[in-house]
Image (cartoon, helix red, strand yellow):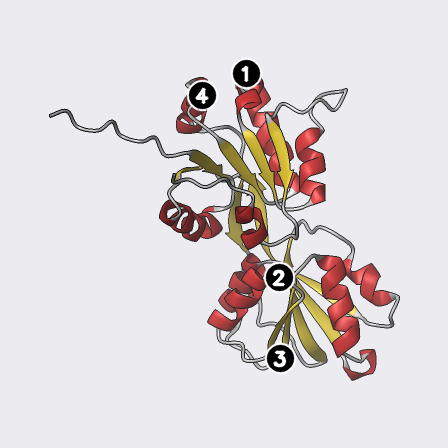
Amino acid sequence: MKNAPEIRRPRLLVTRPMEDAEPLVRRLDGLGFACSVEPMLSLVWLDGPELDLADVQALLFTSANGVRAYTRRTTRRDRPVYAVGDATATAARAAGFAAVESASGDVYALAGLVRARLDPKHGTLLHVAGSKVAGDLAGLLGGAGFTLHRSVLYDAVPADRLSEGTAAIFRTSDLDGVLFFSPRTVLSFVRLLAEAGLVDQCRTVDAFCLSPAVAEAARAYGDQGVTPWRSVRVASRPEQDALLDLLPPARG
């Protein structure tokens, strides 16, 4: 009696930093996907003195990496936290913060939540961030009278080449989709593909994008903005769960 042929699992490529990619890969594996990881950014935690929270009424986090960077610099958890999304809020609660609220969106949603909850007369806001940020959070809140200080606690260093493993799965067309979480990473990824001479192989690959800004970057390849992808799909809201909702069922 012949063994039944092995069913191929759809293969996805995760472009997040390794700290974020590992739990995501475990989740995708449980959903029936095969996964490869190609971090477009490597995180470097910046050393420095204890953070001064004397006049700070609340902490603002726009990524889970901001939470991780903060916990490396101080043990203080005595300020309320306002997080851009649910994953960042979850990271803050896991780090020991008791008062955490999620904007469940982007920096515009976060600014709206802060304006609704806080009074600028009660102190400054501390935005814990990396060296590169998306959106003008200080401007959005400054117009409402808030003073926001950005504390840069980590750097995200872009990759300078594709790994041989990732190049191989493109050459053999053994890839169904790539997950992108920021415009910076998708532009870097397509640039590295072009340097490796692999852009044409994207025409059989779907790009799954966290937000319209990420999707715009995915489509903006070449002088004419011609997308190299089979399709570019956008999450209904800028949250990882919404991005995963775009994926087709991996099991029949």
State the CA–CA distance, disc 2 to disc 3: 18 Å
Q: Quadrant of residue 187?
A: top right
State the CA–CA distance, disc 3 to disc 4: 49 Å
The percent coordinates of residue 106 (x first, y second) are 70, 57
Residue 79's label in the rendered image is 3
Where's the N terminus, which quadrant?
top left
Query: Dot 2: within a 10 Å radius of its alpha carbon, few (fewer than 14), some, or many (20 or more) residues?
Result: many
Mark 2 or 3, closer to the camera: 2
Residue 85's label in the rendered image is 2
Question: Of label 3 and label 4, which has the lower sequence position?
Answer: 3
Where's the C terminus, which quadrant?
top left
The percent coordinates of residue 164 (x first, y second) are 41, 25
Q: Which residue is mark 4?
A: 173
State the CA–CA distance, disc 3 to disc 1: 49 Å
Which amino acid lies under the numbered mark 2 shown in the image of this protein? Gly
Which amino acid lies under the numbered mark 3 shown in the image of this protein? Arg
Residue lying farthest to the left in this orientation: 1
Q: Which residue is mark 1?
A: 197
Q: Quadrant of residue 174?
A: top left
Kindly indicate whether the residue at mark 4 contacts the one at mark 2 (C-beta within 8 angstroms): no
Residue at point 83% right, 60% down? 139
Question: Of label 2 and label 3, which has the lower sequence position?
Answer: 3
Mark 1 or 4, closer to the camera: 4
Secondary element at tag 1: loop
Q: 177 or 64: nearer the eye?
A: 177
Which amino acid lies under the numbered mark 4 shown in the image of this protein? Ser
State the CA–CA distance, disc 2 to disc 4: 34 Å
Query: Dot 4: within a 10 Å radius of its alpha carbon, few (fewer than 14), some, or many (20 or more) residues?
Result: some
Query: Dot 1: within a 10 Å radius of its alpha carbon, few (fewer than 14), some, or many (20 or more) residues?
Result: few
Q: Is residue 148 above or below residue 246?
A: below
Kindly indicate whether the residue at mark 3 contacts the one at mark 2 (C-beta within 8 angstroms): no
